[in-house]
Amino acid sequence: MAVFSYAGRNQNGDEVSGALDAASAEVAAHQLLAGGIYPTAIKQNKAESDEEGISFSIGRKVKADELIILTRQLYSLTKAGVPLNKSMHGLATTLKNNYLVKVLRDVEKNLNSGVTLSSAMSRHVEVFPRLYVSMVMVGENSGRLDEAFKELIDHLELEQETARRIGGAFRYPMFVFIALCIAIVILNLFVIPVFADLFTQFGAELPLMTKILLATSNFFINYWGLLLVISMGSLAAFLSWINKDKGRIKWDAFKLRIPLVGSIILRAVLARFCRTFAMMMSAGVPLLQGVELCSTTVGNAAIGERIKGMRKGIERGESLLQAIGNSEMFTPLVMQMVAVGEQTGQVDEMLNEVADFYNREVDYEIKNLSANMEPILIVMMAILVGILALGIFLPMWDMFGVVQG
C-alpha cells in the first residue's frame, strides 16, 4: 500500500484536500469518487509499498465460487447484525483458502483501526473487484449493506452461469480442433516417415501431393526444435501484446468479428454491461461513476472503450439515450426500451429487461453453435482425410498393383 495526497472538490463545490491509503492512484481516485469527492490532483507521497500487501497479489487468485460463498456468508452475518470486524474474524477462522484468510485478516485489522469496509476491501483489488467495492460503499452510505451483498450475490451467480454456458459451448469445437492438430503432428513425426521409407525401397514415382507431405514431414523432423522455439516465442510475444492496452483493445475487437462466436461474445458482453449498469443505478451510484465502473468490468476492452466514450458524451451534456446511441453498440429496439425507461424514470428496470433480452439471444445462439460448427468440422476432417488419401494411400495402391503385376 502507498499513501496518496489529493486535492479536489466535494459535492457542494468546496475545495478539499487530504491523504489516504490506496494500492494505486487509480484506486485512490475510485475511493474519492465513491465518497463524493471529485479529485483534481493525486500524488503519491512515498514509493514504498506494504510488503505484506504485495505478497497478497503475487501468483494468487480467488475462484468465483469462493467469492460467491464469502459474499453469501457476509450477507447472512450482516443481516443478523454481527459487527463487521467479528464477521471477518469468524470467516477467517473457517476458510480453507490460506490466501483469502490473509486478506480477511488484513480487512479485519483495517476495520479495527477505523477504516470503512469498502476502503479495506479496495486494498485487495485482486479479490474484490471495483464493482464489488463500489456496491459495498453504496450499501455503507445508505445503511443497506445487507441488500448490497444480496445484489452482489445475484450478480456474481449470473456472471458465473453465463461464463459456464459459453465455456461449455466452446468446449466441443476446441476439443475437435486440438485433436486435429495433434493428429497432424503425429502423422508428420511418426506415420509419414514410415511410408517414406517404403516408397524409397520401391523407387516409385511419387505424385506431387505425396512429395509435399514428405517434405513437410522432413521439415517437422529436422526442425522440430526450431518450430518449438518459434511457437513459444510467438506465444510469449502475443501474451505480451494483449497485456498492453492497445493490443488488448485490438484483440478484443477481433474476437467480436470471429464468425459464429463473435456475436455470442458481443451479446454476452452487452448483457453484462446492461445488468451491471442497472445494478449501479438502482443502488444509487452516480451516473458518471457507474458508467466508468462498467467500462472496466464488461470483460472486453474494445466495448470498454466505447463505454468510456459514453461517459465523455454524458460529461458534455448528452442524455443517457444519446450517449448510448452514439456508442453504436445497441439495436434500435434496445434504444426504444432505454427511451421508455428515461421517460418513466425506470431506466434500471429497462436495462434489466435489455440484459434478459441479450441473455436469451446468447442462449439461443449457444444451442445452435454446435449445429453450426459441425459442417465446418466435417469439412476440416474431410480435407485431412483427402490429403492422406491423395498423398499416401494412392501411391500405396499403385505400388501394390505393380507388385501384383
Image (spheres, grey):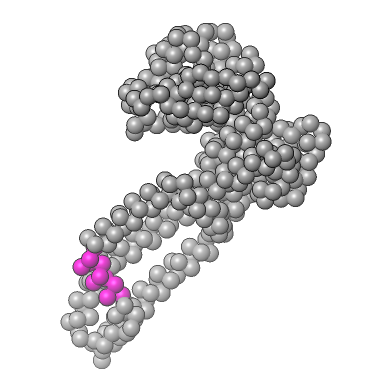
- Residue at position x 38%, y 61% from top? 180
Query: Is the C terminus in the top left, top right, bottom left or bottom right quadrant?
Result: bottom left
Q: Is residue 93 above or below residue 99?
A: above
Residue 291 figure quarter: top right
Provide the major secondary structure of the magenta segment.
helix
Q: Which residues are magenta?
A: 213-224
Q: Between residues 167 and 381, which one lies in front from this camera angle? A: 167
Residue 255, magenta (yes or no): no
Q: Is residue 11 visible?
A: no
Q: Between residues 315 and 99, which one lies in front from this camera angle? A: 315
Q: Is residue 89 visible?
A: yes
Q: Between residues 144 and 386, which one lies in front from this camera angle? A: 144
Residue that extends furthest to the bottom in the rendered view of this protein: 405
Query: Is the N terminus in the top left, top right, bottom left or bottom right quadrant?
Result: top left
- Residue at position x 48%, y 68% from top? 379
Q: Between residues 211 and 344, which one lies in front from this camera angle? A: 344
Residue 336 x %, y %: 78, 45
Residue 216, magenta (yes or no): yes
Residue 245 x %, y %: 47, 46
Residue 337 x %, y %: 77, 42
- Residue at position x 43%, y 66% from top? 381
